[in-house]
């Protein structure tokens, strides 16, 4: 089936955001009387919603969780951390090529209020037909609701969608929605195909050579 729509995760796919997320959650953690994040905690926070992340950081300290949520609401300005995002190479070039060929694009992310700031700062609005955040669904990823919402709004079938993600959560989301999945820069997840450059997505459209193949068994 031809690809009519490419859905992207945000963190780790559109942007290298690990440093920005570390700064954000360390700031929240330290302000709420606990130490900085462990590497395991950072990986978790990198993939989950801010509410889920704070709950994980303070799962044995309900009072600390309440302080952290209060601090988040009253003191955190997500715009302060957006400048630390680093756009992945060749992203805009690839998105432009997809648009020129009539392929729709969307974002499915577990980010919340920071996403509009990111779209504006990096000028991504013209490149995407739809953006679905954790605020737009009742059940965030890995539940397929975000992908199903995109399918319904854009009128595209599951078999004509390619989902580009970098985590097990993204893989589970794609599988549960019945769409094809490509892993971005992550060979640790159990996906058949991994790409290291956004331009490789164009190969799935027959542009620039044959599509990437899964590694030999």
Image (tube, grey):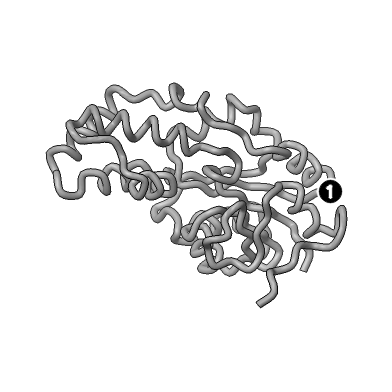
The answer to whether 202 is drawn above or below residue 83 in the figure is below
Side of 64 relative to 57 (left or right): left
Q: Position of residue 185 (x, y in %)?
A: 61, 52
Side of 176 relative to 37 (left or right): right
Residue at position x 58%, y 24% in the image: 121
Residue at position x 45%, y 59% in the image: 142
Q: Position of residue 210 (x, y in %)?
A: 84, 62
Residue at position x 45%, y 41% in the image: 111
Which residue is disc 1 drawn over?
101
Of residue 202 and residue 106, the one placed in the foreground of this image is: 202
Secondary structure beneath label 1: loop
The answer to whether 9 is drawn above or below residue 70 in the figure is below
Side of 172 relative to 107 (left or right): left
Q: Where, by quadrant of the figure, is residue 38 drawn? A: top left
Q: Where, by quadrant of the figure, is residue 206 drawn? A: bottom right
Number of numbered labels in the structure image:
1
The answer to whether 86 is drawn above or below residue 195 in the figure is above
Q: Position of residue 127 (x, y in %)?
A: 70, 38
Of residue 136 and residue 210, the one placed in the foreground of this image is: 210
């Amino acid at each position: 089936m031809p690809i009519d729509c490419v859905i992207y995760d945000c963190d780790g796919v559109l942007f290298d955001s690990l440093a920005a997320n570390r700064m954000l959650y360390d700031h929240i953690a330290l302000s709420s009387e606990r130490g900085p994040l462990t590497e395991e905690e950072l990986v978790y926070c990198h993939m989950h919603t801010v509410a889920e992340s704070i709950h994980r950081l303070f799962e044995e300290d309900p009072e600390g969780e309440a302080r952290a949520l209060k601090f988040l609401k009253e003191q955190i300005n997500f715009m302060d951390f957006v400048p630390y995002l680093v756009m992945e190479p060749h992203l805009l070039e690839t998105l432009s090529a997809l648009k020129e060929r009539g392929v729709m694009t969307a974002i499915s992310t577990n980010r919340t209020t920071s996403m509009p700031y990111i779209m504006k700062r990096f000028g991504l609005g013209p490149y995407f037909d739809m953006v679905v955040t954790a605020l737009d669904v009742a059940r965030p990823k890995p539940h397929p609701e975000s992908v199903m919402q995109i399918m319904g709004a854009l009128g595209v079938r599951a078999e004509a969608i390619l989902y580009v993600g970098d985590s097990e959560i993204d893989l589970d989301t794609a599988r549960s929605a019945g769409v094809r999945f490509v892993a971005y820069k992550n060979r640790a997840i159990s996906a058949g195909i991994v790409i290291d450059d956004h331009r490789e997505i164009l190969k799935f459209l027959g542009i620039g050579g044959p599509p990437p193949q899964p590694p030999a068994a």
